[in-house]
Image: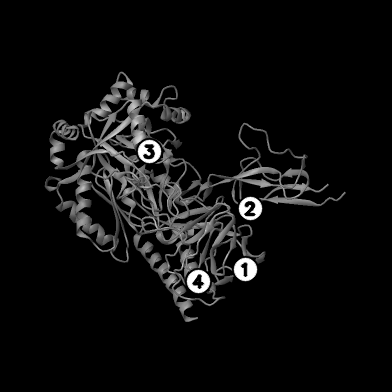
């Protein structure tokens, strides 16, 4: 068992996500930064899809009630065991009675805590991920609260030596200014040429409305091409006949503030979408926090697929490195 | 002209038409049904939408351009004329102009086109009805095709099966509300919806559904296979009920005995397109027989 | 009398508020006495409001940020001087 002394700002149980139910309006949920999430599971010898804790901005205080093997990855929210700083991206042993706490966030936004055996919560539609809007998955469908107790599963598939560390060049570095690559398309024809140009030349600031559902950005107002609205779309020029939203797609309701839709987002609606964040950069997006800057960079589909291959190669390297130790 | 668009490296978005119609929705339904039957490798989700559809795939299994070629072939080969829809016709009881939804919508008047009236009064006026009662009559006279599911789990977009000139159309809120009660019945663009769970929303609010369309505990009979009740292709008949009936249904939901009145139905899109009124009379006759 | 000054930091990024609600008075005025544990402001992020508390007794000498400023994590919010 792991006892929650303080829950942190928003700490949830997440695995790879709830895949295959998009058509009924169920978003995937799941870890926002899948690279760090997967690395954490690999470091403790878990199946890649084992449930871990996703910690956002401010860490919880947790008390282990049994000996456990853990790993912390992701953004830098310096972890401490019994008040002593411990390294991230490394296999650690904790003893029954040990307390895990965190300093203020230094870089990035989200930390993953994997425990050998995984966090044991019920599978809902094939996933243990928390989806708070509908109150399903994770621990009672909600973020952790003080007094919660988390069961540790028995799903570890191999033992990893304590002190095993991800090699330095495979550990991401996070910045306060970020380039996020997108593929332009969907309903981008709705934006004026000038606004399209502005969208890619501005440094957008992440607002306080930036969570698992989506990130909202502040910059300047964008305009849509004037037209007589098609039947059924609604009257605002940013409206379209309600359609499906890809994960990572960006829309600009009324032209006011762009919103990137992420893991817990709505699956469809009536706003024109203009581009989609490439899958490899969703991990990076998840580590950007409020008041940091984002510049969107348009890439073609082949570049997106290449980035995806490079991402898969990095994960393969992590696995290979750990097996060699 | 159909547009095939990349939604990043995991989605293809296909817009069959910019405007909504029954024809285009049937076409999206027919193509996605055929795509599902072909069981291509690497397809994760097939999401038919109102005038478009979307496919989620794994590019390691199928290159997006190859998938697009396949979808273009389907657009050519699939016809709504030789396609049967097997679904359900469902009686969906709605309490219009109810106190809870009214309380909610009055809190957001500053986000509305017409802060001085209610959503029902406003929608009646912009659609040329003399009263909200006439609008309610028009909403409940003819059934709706469930043309898309999404936004949140189980939310049905419903498009009324009447000729274009009879369609009700309303703007969405100027700025979306931050709160919508669970089971609220709303209308936006040309679509009626029921909000399955409490949350944000931008549709005009007209009433509240008596029974749930999403139930995570899956206690009621209609939810034994799925947390979500509506399915694309269903035909929903919204029926105006009294407070008395509303409370009786709520009690049945509470004690677990409520079941939607439904009939299995198989029909051809052509039947609807050629004579929506005759089709509507026939299915409603069957439902309440 | 010591002139030790303690800075209050925001542990999270977000929007800073000195008032509990738009139509309410500020939690504390500059120059007022403060006790460890007193709430001096709120930081809103991800639709959560996080209470910023004084960590020491003293006088709240000054705020270093304005109402509705967007803060970085770790940003200095106020100075408390020990009495």
Question: Is B285 above or below relative to A309?
Answer: above
Residue A153, x across and y down, in percent: 47, 65
Q: Residues within 10 Å of mark 3 (few under 14, many from 20)?
A: few
Snapshot quadrant of residue A194: top left
State the residue position of label 1.
A86
Label 1 is found on which chain of the structure? A
The extreme bottom residue here reads A324
The residue located at (73%, 38%) in the rendering is C29
Q: Is residue B107 above or below residue B80?
A: above
Tell me the distance, in whole angstroms, between the alpha carbons under discs 4 and 1: 15 Å
Along the horizontal axis of the image, is A112 left or right of B226? right
Quarter of the image that includes the C terminus of chain B: top left
Residue named by callout 4: A43
Q: Nearer the viewer, mark 2 or mark 1?
A: 1
* Quadrant of res B158: top left
Q: Chain of mark 3?
A: B
- Do the residues under discs 4 and 1 have CB atoms within 8 angstroms? no
Q: Secondary structure at mark 1?
A: loop
Q: Are marks 2 and 1 on the same chain?
A: no
- For residue B254, the mark is 3
C-alpha distance separating marks 3 and 1: 51 Å
Categorize mark 1 by other alpha carbons within 10 Å: few (<14), some (14-19), many (20+). some
**Mark 2 lies on residue:** C11
Mark nearer the viewer, 2 or 4: 4
Q: Which residue appears at 32% of the width and 19% of the height?
A: B131
SS at mark 2? loop
Circle 4: element type: helix
Residue A120 vertical position relative to residue C62 in the rendered view, above or below: below
User: In the figure, is residue B94 to the left or right of A204?
Assistant: left
């Amino acid at each position: 068992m792991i006892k929650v002394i303080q829950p942190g700002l928003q700490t949830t149980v997440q695995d790879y996500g709830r895949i295959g139910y998009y058509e009924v309006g169920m978003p995937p949920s799941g870890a926002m930064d899948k690279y760090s999430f997967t690395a954490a599971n690999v470091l403790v010898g878990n199946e890649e899809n084992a449930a871990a804790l996703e910690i956002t901005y401010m860490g919880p205080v947790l008390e282990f009630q049994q000996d456990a093997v853990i790993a912390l990855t992701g953004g830098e929210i310096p972890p401490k065991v019994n008040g002593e700083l411990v390294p991230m991206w490394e296999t650690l042993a904790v003893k029954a009675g040990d307390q895990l706490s965190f300093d203020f966030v230094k870089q990035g936004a989200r930390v993953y805590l994997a425990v050998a055996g995984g966090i044991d919560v019920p599978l809902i539609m094939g996933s243990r991920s928390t989806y708070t809007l509908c109150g399903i998955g994770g621990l009672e469908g909600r973020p952790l609260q003080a007094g919660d107790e988390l069961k540790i599963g028995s799903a570890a598939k191999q033992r990893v030596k304590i002190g095993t560390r991800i090699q330095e060049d495979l550990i991401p570095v996070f910045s306060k200014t970020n380039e996020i690559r997108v593929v332009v398309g969907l309903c981008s024809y709705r934006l004026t040429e000038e606004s399209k140009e502005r969208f890619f030349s501005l440094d957008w600031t992440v607002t306080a409305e930036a969570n698992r559902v989506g990130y909202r950005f502040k910059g300047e107002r964008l305009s849509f091409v004037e037209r007589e609205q098609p039947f059924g779309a609604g009257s605002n020029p940013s409206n379209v006949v309600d359609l499906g939203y890809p994960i990572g797609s960006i829309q600009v309701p009324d032209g006011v503030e762009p919103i990137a839709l992420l893991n817990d987002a709505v699956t469809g609606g009536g706003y024109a979408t203009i581009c989609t964040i490439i899958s490899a950069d969703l991990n990076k997006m998840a580590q950007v926090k409020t008041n940091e800057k984002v510049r969107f960079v348009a890439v073609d589909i082949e570049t997106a697929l290449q980035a995806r291959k490079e991402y898969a190669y990095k994960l393969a390297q992590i696995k290979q490195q750990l097996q060699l130790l | 002209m159909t547009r095939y668009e990349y939604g990043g490296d995991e989605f293809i978005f296909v817009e069959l038409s910019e405007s909504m119609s029954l024809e285009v929705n049937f076409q999206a339904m027919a193509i996605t049904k055929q795509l599902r039957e072909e069981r291509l490798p690497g397809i994760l989700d097939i999401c038919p939408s109102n005038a478009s559809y979307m496919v989620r795939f794994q590019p390691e299994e199928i290159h997006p351009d190859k998938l697009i070629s396949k979808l273009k072939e389907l657009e050519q080969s699939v016809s709504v004329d030789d396609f049967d829809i097997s679904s359900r016709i469902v009686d969906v009881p709605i309490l219009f102009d109810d106190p809870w939804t009214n309380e909610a919508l009055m809190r957001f008047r500053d986000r509305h086109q017409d802060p001085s009236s209610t959503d029902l009064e406003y929608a009646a006026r912009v659609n040329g009805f003399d009263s909200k009662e006439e609008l309610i009559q028009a909403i409940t006279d003819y059934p709706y095709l469930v043309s898309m599911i999404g936004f949140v789990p189980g939310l049905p977009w419903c498009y009324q099966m009447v000729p274009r000139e009879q369609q009700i159309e309303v703007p969405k809120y100027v700025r979306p509300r931050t709160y919508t009660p669970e089971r609220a019945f709303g209308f936006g663009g040309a679509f009626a919806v029921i909000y399955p769970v409490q949350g944000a929303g931008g549709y005009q609010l007209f009433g509240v559904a008596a029974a749930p369309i999403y139930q995570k505990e899956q206690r009621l009979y209609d939810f034994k296979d799925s947390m979500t009740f509506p399915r694309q292709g269903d035909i929903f008949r919204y029926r105006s009920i009294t407070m008395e009936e509303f409370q009786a249904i709520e009690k049945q939901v509470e004690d677990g005995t409520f079941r939607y009145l439904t009939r299995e139905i198989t029909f051809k899109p052509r039947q609807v397109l050629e004579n929506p009124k005759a089709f509507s009379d026939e299915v409603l006759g069957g439902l309440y027989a | 009398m010591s002139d030790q000054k303690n800075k209050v930091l925001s542990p999270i990024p977000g929007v800073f508020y000195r008032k509990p609600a738009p139509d309410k008075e500020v939690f504390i005025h500059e120059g007022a006495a403060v006790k460890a544990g007193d709430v001096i402001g709120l930081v809103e992020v991800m639709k959560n409001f996080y209470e910023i508390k004084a960590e020491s007794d003293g006088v709240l000498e000054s705020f270093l940020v304005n109402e509705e400023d967007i803060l970085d994590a770790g940003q200095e919010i106020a100075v408390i001087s020990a009495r």
